[in-house]
Image (tube, rainbow, N blue to C red):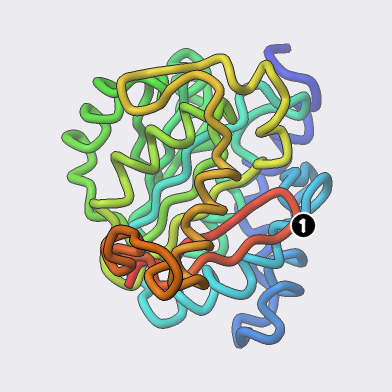
């Protein structure tokens, strides 16, 4: 078979009603538990709730956002084609949680996307393909999708310059009040994740350091002590940053 755990993947595809009996009257307090329960309702579980605890940020921010705007436009980068259990596990979760949303999935591996489509794993999703570390690919994604996303989730290649170039391209197109999630930041200082480079990002950059700079601008008014650029210029349209283990989320003002 093409992937380990293929039988479980097929089980999840065949049983489209999995996860639908969960109480839909969640609130921001119970969002973490609601997200985790939905992810765990599938026979093959996304690593968002097994290896990581992303139910924290998604339960606190993404679920209430959908409740207030069911027709949100959301892009996730990273179908999971290199995962041992196969691609599309987070797609299952998004489909169940956000049935009224406009859902987009971006992935490097075009052949994997085609196989997933053929199996019905991407029903209800629009897709983009290519390497997010290439500026011309990001420009094509913007053209094909129209940009203007309410939510972006970067669970893609994890190279720092892939993440940072994508942020620089997509953040300006994020709608006011939207959220930008960056997963798997725990690998940022590993040398092999600092090798990529592109016109928007130099080799050796670490995304966590860029997030620190944003936090510094949000929390410290340097103009009180030193001559510096306008603080509001540095902050721009970032309303807040929240970080948890392995990940951060930024909200657009």
Residue 195 placement: quadrant: top right
Q: Residue at x 54, y 37 (%)?
A: 121
Q: Residue at x 61, y 31 (%)?
A: 80
Q: Position of residue 65 (x, y in %)?
A: 45, 75
Number of numbered callouts drawn:
1
Query: In this rendering, does residue 212 appear at all?
Result: yes
Quadrant of the frame with the C terminus: bottom left
Q: Is residue 60 left or right of residue 203?
A: right
Q: Residue at x 54, y 32 (%)?
A: 156
Quadrant of the frame with the N terminus: top right
Q: Position of residue 75 (x, y in %)?
A: 40, 47
Q: Is residue 168 left or right of residue 173?
A: right
Q: Residues within 10 Å of mark 1 (few under 14, many from 20)?
A: some
Q: Is residue 23 above or below residue 150?
A: below
Q: Position of residue 243 (x, y in %)?
A: 64, 61
Q: Is residue 87 above or below residue 57?
A: above
Q: Residue at x 52, y 62 (%)?
A: 216
Query: In this rendering, does residue 157 appear at all?
Result: no
Q: Secondary structure at mark 1?
A: loop
Q: Is residue 50 above or below residue 54?
A: above
Residue positioned most to the front: 226
**Residue topped by disc 1:** 53
Q: Position of residue 152 (x, y in %)?
A: 42, 51
Which residue is nearer to you in this view: 203 or 45? 203
Which residue is nearer to you in this view: 56 or 50? 56
Which residue is nearer to you in this view: 205 or 231? 231
Residue 101 placement: quadrant: bottom left
């Amino acid at each position: 078979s093409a992937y380990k755990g293929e039988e479980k993947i097929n089980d999840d595809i065949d049983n489209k009603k999995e996860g639908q009996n969960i109480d839909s009257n969640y609130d921001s307090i119970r969002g973490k538990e609601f997200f985790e329960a939905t992810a765990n309702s599938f026979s093959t579980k996304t690593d968002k709730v097994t290896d990581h605890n992303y139910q924290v940020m998604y339960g606190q921010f993404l679920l209430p956002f959908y409740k207030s705007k069911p027709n949100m436009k959301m892009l996730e980068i990273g179908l999971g084609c290199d995962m041992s259990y196969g691609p599309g596990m987070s797609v299952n979760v998004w489909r169940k949680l956000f049935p009224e949303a406009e859902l987009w999935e971006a992935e490097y591996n075009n052949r994997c996307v085609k196989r997933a489509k053929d199996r019905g794993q991407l029903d209800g999703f629009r897709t983009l393909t290519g390497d997010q570390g290439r500026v011309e690919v990001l420009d094509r994604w913007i053209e094909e999708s129209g940009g203007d996303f309410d939510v972006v989730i970067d669970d893609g290649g994890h190279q720092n310059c892939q993440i940072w170039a994508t942020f620089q391209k997509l953040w300006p197109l994020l709608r006011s009040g939207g959220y930008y999630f960056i997963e798997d930041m725990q690998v940022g200082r590993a040398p092999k994740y600092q090798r990529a480079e592109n016109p928007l990002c130099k080799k050796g950059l670490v995304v966590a350091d860029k997030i620190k700079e944003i936090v510094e601008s949000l929390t410290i008014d340097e103009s009180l002590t030193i001559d510096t650029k306008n603080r509001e210029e540095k902050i721009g349209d970032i309303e807040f940053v929240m970080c948890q283990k392995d990940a951060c989320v930024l909200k657009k003002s």
